[in-house]
Amino acid sequence: MGWLIIYHGVHVSINGYVYSACTALLELENPQIEIARLPYPLFQPEEVWELKGEVNNVCCPTGTVVFDDVLYVYYGAADERIGCASMSLSQLLKELMHNKK
């Protein structure tokens, strides 16, 4: 299908910068070509330990692993903790395909 990338994005809010996990799908044979990108964060700071810390409002993805159809995304939270979010890989790919470029 392609290269699934999980990366951090940043936007400015009334509370300062917010760092969120984002995702895109790149063409397999030519990863310079973007196939799809979610128009919203995959996940963003919501829990107290993600909102307040050394650096506030941070969910910065750092690694992934897939078991069966479950994608686990490990991330830094507020530069003080490590979190893990999980989701259905097939559902994520389906959602991405609804947001083709």
Image: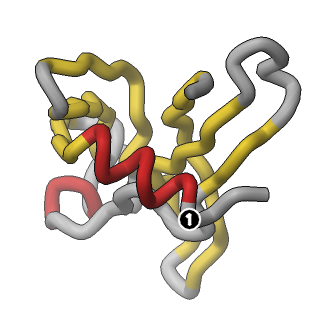
Rendered location of residue 13, percent (x, y): 58, 80
Residue 95 shown left or right of residue 35 in the figure: left
Q: Note whether 69 is above or below 50 in the view shown.
A: above
How did the renderer colour the structure?
secondary structure
Q: Residue under circle 1?
A: 98
Q: Residue at x 55, y 36 (%)?
A: 7
Specify the quadrant that holds the N terminus.
top right
Q: Quadrant of residue 8?
A: top right
Rendered location of residue 36, percent (x, y): 67, 50
Q: Residue at x 27, y 51 (%)?
A: 53
Residue 83 shown left or right of residue 97 in the figure: left
For badge 1, the amino acid type reads His
Specify the quadrant that holds the C terminus.
bottom right
Q: Quadrant of residue 3?
A: top right
Residue 90 shown left or right of residue 35 in the figure: left
Farthest residue, direction top: 29
User: Who is closer to the viewer here, 96 or 41?
Assistant: 96
Residue 9 visible within the image: yes
Q: Residue at x 53, y 69 (%)?
A: 40
Mark 1 neighbour class, 10 Å CA radius: few under 14, some 14 to 19, many 20 or more: few
Farthest residue, direction front: 1
Q: Note whether 76 is above or below 53 in the view shown.
A: above
Residue 17 visible within the image: no
Farthest residue, direction bottom: 14
Of helix, strand and loop, which one carries label 1? Answer: loop
Q: Note whether 23 is above or below 29 in the view shown.
A: below
User: Who is closer to the viewer here, 13 or 70?
Assistant: 70
Rendered location of residue 31, percent (x, y): 78, 21
